[in-house]
Image (tube, rainbow, N blue to C red):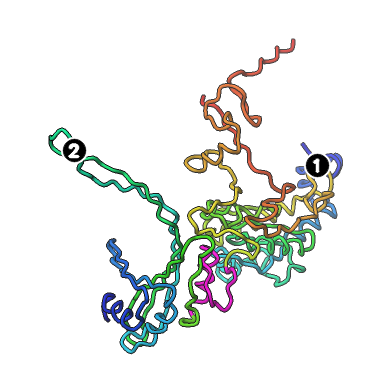
Amino acid sequence: METLEQIRDRLLARFPGAEVTLVTNPGAAAQHSLSLGLAHAAAMALFLRDDAELKLDYCSNVTGVDWPEKEIIESTKVSVPDPAGGPAKIVEQKTKRIQPGSLEVVYHLYSMAKKHGPVIIRLRTANRTDRANVPSLTPVWRSCEFQEREVFDLFGVKFDGHPDLRRILMWDEFTAHPMRKDYVEPDDYEWEPTPHGTVLDKAKAHYPPSALVAAAPAAPAHGAPTHAAPAPKEAPKP
Amino acid sequence: MSEPATDAPGLSDAERDELRRHGILLTKIEELVNLGRSKSVWPLQFGLACCAIEMIAASMARFDIARFGSEVFRPSPRQADLLIVSGTVTKKMAPQVVRLWNQMPEPKYCIAMGACAISGGPFKQGYNVLKGIDRFIPVDVYIPGCPPRPEALLHGLIQLQEQIRTAKSSGPKTTRHLRPGDCNYPVPEFGDRDLEPPANPAVWQPPQIVRSEKA
């Protein structure tokens, strides 16, 4: 199979003006991918499917990635010349920059005819709120239909041109997108008798502090039997 | 302590056993009815997840739930006595489970089979799984396990049969379906974040934390 660089160059030659960038994966898996610009994404997907060299005729997996808005602090070292004529001082300058959030859809493509793959392509939305749209690739690979619905359900990516874009896992009345990183889950935990970790943090919002302290000497909460002050025994009857 | 109103006056269980040894059977209609009920509990043919596979195994020849009179898995809730909640109840499925329960005729019984049906199990921390079917349905027998083996299901069934056999039709320990005002199980609706309501307060209350001090 061609390398991703070759595929990128052929895509750029075939679609002038299209955005194709190679996204490298620094991890051990080293599964690099191609990020496609949204304007030509559907046409480029058709090209990947029908090209005689690639014949990527099978889309095995569609998934989503949430990239929330992130504040990045960059520190740069600037050398400031000393006005008195001494050696220049090196001053660290910190700049804050807000990286806008976005949602990403990842497609894993294989070729049944050529028996090669995967080629991974990514589509990135403009933002996470009102412009969370990408073109649907269901017209190209039919197997994307349910998986794009799942990404729509759990991440809130709207697929333009999808034939039947409805929620697939959660019910229709549900409004949130549970796989987003800022999702707040419903408050329906059944509190455990010995909470710890995050469950303890949540339990604190529900129970008075005395109920959560293990060795509370007084005021047993919720009718717990107290051993600190045993009831005086009745005098034996004569 | 004996049940004053329902038991035969002046006769203890030991005395009745003694009479039975001499060929005199003293019993009550209630006991006969309970015996009949307990020996033919027809479950609803209804499975939710991997626990259902164990339930199927319990119904087949190797474990043979027919030995206990429960081999007739009914495909309709109108003919079933027992709802075996066998598996994970997602919030999307919960209204349908409650609706099936409402469609079953009294007297009806419920077994929560497996960790998920009891409490949500490994999915308890998740957002989409009901944390125990006992939030909406009164459960008679809980069978822990993930999934429980067929023997455990058979044991749970025997426990349920024991409950049915000793059920009382009056007095403070009246069986559930004869108590007044205990026949309405509202079906939860789909809300925009969670089920509405998230639990039936008449059936389930959140547990209270009770801490005993260190000795």
- Residue type beneath disc 2: Lys
Q: Give the chain letter at badge 1.
A: B
In this view of the protein, which residue sits in the foreground, A105 or A108?
Answer: A105
Q: Give the chain letter at badge 2.
A: A
- Outermost residue on the left side: it is A86
- Residue A101, image quadrant: bottom left
In this view of the protein, which residue sits in the foreground, B175 or A59?
Answer: A59
Q: Position of residue B91 (x, y in %)?
A: 62, 59
The residue pinned by badge 1 equals B172
Q: How many marks?
A: 2
Give me the residue at 60% from left, 34% from top. B210
User: Mark 1 or mark 2: which is in front?
Assistant: 2
In the picture, the disc for residue A89 is 2
Magenta segment, which residues? A143-168
Image height check: is A221 above or below B113? above
Q: Position of residue B101 (x, y in %)?
A: 73, 61
Is residue A162 located in the magenta-colored stretch of the structure? yes
Give me the residue at 38% from left, 77% from top. A109
Query: Seen in the image, is A218 located left or right of residue B122?
Result: right
Query: Seen in the image, is A100 located left or right of residue B2?
Result: left
